[in-house]
Amino acid sequence: MIKNTDYQDLNTVAEEIINGRKLTDDNLRELLALTEEEYIQKLHHVARKVRDHFFGNRVFLYSFVYFSTYCKNNCAFCYYNRCNNIRRYRLNLEQIRNIARAVKKENVHMVDLTMGEDPYFHNEPERFIEVVRTVKEETGLPIMISPGVMDDRILSRLHRNGADFLALYQETHDRALFRKLRAGQSFDKRNHAREFARNNGYCIEDGILTGVGNDIESTIISLRGMEKGQPDMVRVMTFVPQEGTPFEGMTRGSSLSELKIISVLRLMFPNKLIPASLDLEGIDGMVHRLNAGANVVTSIISSDSSLEGVVNYDRELEKRDRDSKSVIKRLRTMGMEPASQAEFNRIIEKQQVALLRIPVVTL
């Protein structure tokens, strides 16, 4: 598909994807097994061609508000798992309101409200509903929630109070690997929450980890699992060993696998949102991920913010170069521009129109 194809013919491959060609499992095996730089660059070339057809040079920007680092789960890969002896924080409503007012001044398209499965909010979900309502009122922007698994009734109420997007990463759709990563958690409940949200007004995001023992066949299972869920946004992130976790001693791999998977995701989901996170390698890493076919920049945090991220490559740095002004400046050196708010809003509106054909469950 890629190896013996010159760049002119690669443009034909891109056109075929644009016109609806689906990748077979054998195609996926070939692409995921690429190791030579020449072939990987060809893959990225096709992914950019496909992305540019649907999105041009426009990029979407999301802020990141990790408002509680408490969690009841014990995920083997996560720094914030309940057993890790770390310093944690939980912002109160007034602190969140002040951050929302600051976010309103940033050039971002959506606010990502992230927390662990904090019992303070999960046991009293009205508290989280109030957070969403407050940030919506203060910013007027679309809201993404990343709260872990919540039941159908609460998801419905959150949507009615301003939540537009649900991010709920499976990490892997390989059930055996899932049990190692998310010990004691339900694979099916996570799937159900995304399905319920998608059928009841949300746009949804699914995501996988790479570099946690998932070989090519396991990765294909995950890619097909995401495909089955019909998400509006798909992501992959490289596993980074975190101090104090069961996976602390694992070797960190390069981002090569992540970049290949971003390109593969673009070929599988040609007109969907694919993030380039700042939380792994900052703005330099953002460039590589956009060049692999991504079209969203996530984990934007203002330069004076002390909020945590998920991976926090910059935890010990004095300057956190992840603010929207710095991101936009670098985008323009790449010939890319932030999309308009109207362009992003149309993505959400498109999902709403599609739902007119699906019976909505009111709880």
Image (cartoon, grey):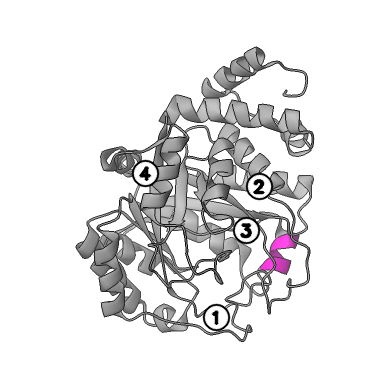
What type is the residue that disc 3 sits on?
Glu
> Which part of the image, by quadrant, shows the C terminus?
bottom left
Spot occupied by residue 245 in the image (x, y as percentages of width and height): 69, 76
Q: Secondary structure at mark 4?
A: loop
Task: Report the Cα–Cα distance between label 2 and label 4.
Answer: 34 Å
On screen, residue 341 above or below 310: above
What residue is shown at x 54% (from left), y 36% (from top)? 269
Q: Earlier in the sequence, mark 3 or mark 1?
A: 1
* CA distance for labels 1 and 4: 34 Å
Residue 72, numbered label: 1
Q: CA distance from mark 3 to mark 4?
A: 28 Å
- Residue type at the position of mark 4: Ile
**Depth-wise, is mark 2 or mark 1 nearer the camera?**
2
Disc 3/disc 1 C-alpha distance (Å): 18 Å
Residue 361 shown left or right of residue 318 in the figure: left
Horizontal and vertical percent position of residue 316: 56, 72
Residue at label 3? 171
Magenta stretch: give its range.
176-181
Q: Around disc 3, counting alpha carbons within 10 Å, would you say few (fewer than 14), some (14 to 19), or many (20 or more)?
A: many
Q: Is residue 178 magenta?
A: yes
Dot 1 or dot 4: first in sequence order is 1
